[in-house]
Amino acid sequence: MADAGYLTIGKVVKKLQPEYPELSISKVRYLEDEGLLTPARTPGGYRLYSQRDVKRLETILYLQKTRFMPLSVIKEELGKHENATTAELEQALSQEAQAQGASTVASLPLDDEETISKLHPIDRMPELTGAPVSFVRQLADAGVLTLRKSPHGRDLVDGKDFTIIRAAERLRHYGIGPRNLRMYVVAANREEGMFEQALGTLYAKRGEDPSASQRIEFAQATDEVLALTDTIRDTLIRRMLSKAFKDMELGSDQQDVLEHR
């Protein structure tokens, strides 16, 4: 069987590592455990990957790297487009997004409550977030997130930080790296006092045992304050960028189209 174009798991990893440096044998095995890959087996139990298996693995890695999809969504899309090439699947996904009127602005996947509430080994970040382990460590070094330690000394990542990791990984394609993001850590520390003061009155009203309605009111106020300050920040930055790139400023008709997509 090996002579008929089949590869061992080690050769598959070696073949794809130039394009996907974080790929490892353990990750390929994990994808198999998740039901995304089904290699053939020798009588002795060794995995053998066909060219079709390798192409499927390439597609999975590509979708993680470029579209930041969680594995559950990738598995669903591969099921819908079983025999499609990577290029055909990319085209199908783009057409689906356009048919749904999706914005060109990046849409990051949302994690379930179980994922958010847990600490996860850093070596699982490539399959959970699409970001290389080395990049997650750079974010930690820049103070953008904090790594925890397991009882055995393993580095762990809080599930609540997955959104930050995916957004930072996407920004990297624009040349904005972890060191650049350090300014937002500084800004957040500086602005926290302003938000604490703004929300202090509502917090003081909670009593020792806040009611459900008080919790909802506080959450809504927090969301509104953050949304409003984001609006001011975004507007000011857009104004500055419009001066720097005058010939790229959108006309009113183009802006209307984008806002209603």
Image (cartoon, rainbow, N blue to C red):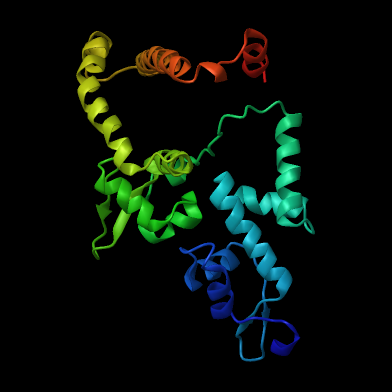
x 65%, y 67%: residue: 37
In the image as oriented, which residue stretches furthest toward the right? Answer: 83
Residue 235: give x, y in percent of width and height: 43, 13
x 68%, y 63%: residue: 56
Residue 20: give x, y in percent of width and height: 52, 62
- Vertical side of 30 occupied by 223: above or below: above
Q: Is residue 63 left or right of residue 154?
A: right
x 56%, y 51%: residue: 64
How many marks on residues? 0
Residue 12: give x, y in percent of width and height: 59, 75
x 27%, y 36%: residue: 182
The quarter of the displayed image where residue 103 is located: top right
Note whether residue 121 is visible. Answer: no
Viewport quadrant of the N terminus: bottom right
In the image as oriented, which residue stretches furthest toward the front? Answer: 247
Residue sitting nearer the eye, 56 or 254: 254
Q: Is residue 51 left or right of residue 249?
A: right
Residue sitting nearer the eye, 200 or 107: 107
Note whether residue 185 is visible. Answer: yes
Viewport quadrant of the C terminus: top right
- Vertical side of 184 occupied by 217: above or below: above
- Vertical side of 162 occupied by 103: above or below: above
Residue 209: give x, y in percent of width and height: 26, 20
The quarter of the displayed image where residue 253 is located: top right
